[in-house]
Image (cartoon, rainbow, N blue to C red):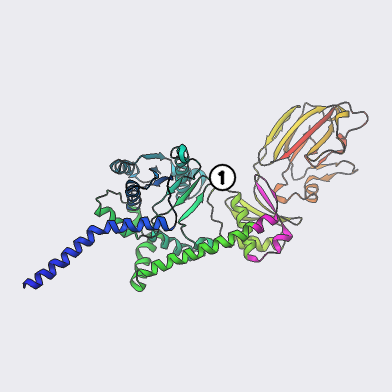
Amino acid sequence: MSDVQFLLIQRNVNKKKKSVNNFSDDIYIRFVNFCREHDLISKGDSVLVAISGGADSVALLDLLRRWKDEGTEFWLSAAHFNHKIRNESDSDLKDVQRICRALNVECFTGEGQVETAGIHQKRAVHDIAREMRYDFLMDVANQKCCRDDHHEKLPLIATGHHLDDQVETLLMRLFSGGGIEGLAGIRRSLDFGEPLHARLIRPLLGFRHEELISYCQEKSLRYVEDMSNYDNTYPRNRIRHKLVPSIVDLFGESALQGISRSADHAGHASVIINHFTEKAYKDALLERRECDIVLDYHIISSYLIGLRYNCLLKAARELTTRQTRFTYERIKTAEKRLINRYKGITELGDGVSTCVHHDRIWIFRQPRNLLPIQLICPGSYDIPDWGRLELKAISPDQKEFPPPEGRLFLDLDVIGTNEISIEPAGSGDRFQPLGMTGHRKVSDFLSEIGVPIHRRRYPVIRAKSQIAAIPPFQIAERYKISPRTKRVLKIQWTDC
C-alpha cells in the first residue's frame, strides 16, 4: 500500500470519527431548533417527560436535560406509569428510576391493574392503558410539577413520539378510512383534558427512531427494549417492519417527510373545519344535559352533509369521557336515518345512541335504571340521569297559579304520606291527566309532549299503586287541588 493510499484511508477514518463525535451534537441542535420553531417550550414552563424507558423517551429526557443545563430556564421532571401488563414491567420501572437518577432528574411513578380493568369494563387493554397513563400524567403535572412562580401556565407533558410513529399512525388511519382529523396524525402540541389540564408536546416528531437509538448509544444512555414491538401479529408492527422500509427503498427517506407534511396540511384543514363545526353546532344546540344533547332537526338538515357528520360526532364525544373513536360508518348511518326521520334508535358506539323526535335530534347515553324510591315529605331526592325532586307540604294559600316551570301541586290529604314512591313508568301504565275524563297511556302522553323513545321509562310519582304525577309535566285528575283541600304537596323538579 502506498503512502498516498494510506493517507487517504486514514483521512476517511478520521472523517468518520469526526462524524460520529458530532452526531449527538447535530441531534441536539436540530432538537432545540425544532422546539423553538414550533414554540413548544418557553421560559418558566414546567415540563414533565413521559418516560417508558425506551430509547425514544430516554433520548428526549437527555436532550431536555442538556437544553436546561445550558441555560434555558424551565422546570424538568419525568414520570413513569407501570401498566402491570408485561412480565418485565417491574424491572422496567427500576431501570427508569436508575436512568433518571443518572441524569439527575426527579422521577414520579404510578401503577395500575390495566388487565383487570379491561376484563371488568370489557374494553381493549391498550385503550384502558392509555387512559390510565394520561390520567396519571395529568395528575402529576398539575399536583406535583406546577410551581408558584408559574402556576398560571399550563404544565407541559412531553412524549417521545417520533417521525416513524407519525408515519405509522397516518398509514393506519388511512387504511381504516380516517377522516381529515384522523389524517392530521400526531399533533406537535395539543391542549389536553376537560376541563383543560395540560398541554401535550411532541418535540421528537422531526426525528427517525433509528436516530434516537444511535443518540442513546453514542451517549452511553441505558434504555430498555420492549420485545412486543417486534411482534408482527400487531398491524402497527407490520407497518413498521415491512411497509415503511419498502417505502424508503422505493422512494427514499424524503417520502417519510412527505407523509409528515401531509399530516401538517390535514391538521391545518382540521382546524378550519373545527372552527365552522363549533359555530354550526352552537347554532343547532337546543339543550344540553348530563346524559343527552338535543339539536334542532331543521337547522342540522340545512347543513352540508360533512357538517352534519361533524356536529353528530361532536355531540357524541361530549357524552363520553373516554377518547372514543366513533366510526365513519356509524356516523354516516346515523345521519342518513336522522335526516329521513327514522323512528328507531341508532347506536353510535361506547353507549351513545341517537334518534329523532318532534323536530329534535337526540344524542344520548341511556339513563341509568331507576329503582323505586320511597318518598318522605318533606324531602329531597337525586334521580341519577334524570333530575332532582323536592317535596314540601304547604298550605293552600301558598300555592302558586299558574304553577311556575318545574313545579306541581297536589292535594296532600288525598295522596297521603305513607305510600308515596317514585319509580320508572311501565310499558302499560295509564293515568287520568288533569282536566280529562278518560285515561291515557303514559307512553302516549310522553310522546305527545316531546319526550323521545329512549326516555319513556320516565320517573313517575305513585300514591299506592296509582300514578299521581309525572314531574314536571302533569298531575292526575284525582289529586288536583279543590276548595276542600287543607294541605298541599308541592313538587319541585329540576332536570339533571
Question: How many marks on residues?
Answer: 1
> In this rendering, would 294 be left or right of 482?
left
Q: Which amino acid is tagged 1?
A: Pro
The stretch in magenta equals: 279-305
**Which quadrant is the N terminus positioned in?**
bottom left
In this view of the protein, which residue sits in the foreground, 75 or 111?
75
> In this rendering, would 460 be left or right of 260?
right
Q: Residue at x 54, y 48 (%)?
A: 322
Label 1 element class: loop
- Above or below, 289 against 421 in this view is below
- Above or below, 371 against 299 in this view is above
Question: Percent x, y for residue 375?
Answer: 73, 30
Which residue is the site of mark 1?
195
Q: Residue at x 41, y 39 (%)?
A: 110
**Which quadrant is the C terminus positioned in?**
top right
Question: Percent x, y for residue 21?
Answer: 22, 58
- Above or below, 88 against 175 in this view is above
Q: Residue at x 36, y 55 (%)?
A: 32
Q: State yes or no: residue 108 in magenta.
A: no
Estimate how packed mark 1 is, as few (under 14), some (14 to 19) or many (20 or more) residues with alpha carbons within 10 Å. Answer: few
Res. 178 visible in picture: no
- Above or below, 253 against 321 in this view is below
Question: Percent x, y for residue 180?
Answer: 53, 64
In this view of the protein, which residue sits in the foreground, 40 or 270?
40
Question: Percent x, y for residue 384?
Answer: 66, 39
> In this rendering, would 179 be left or right of 43?
right
- Quarter of image, res 282: bottom right
Q: State yes or no: residue 280 in magenta.
A: yes
In this view of the protein, which residue sits in the foreground, 437 or 169?
169
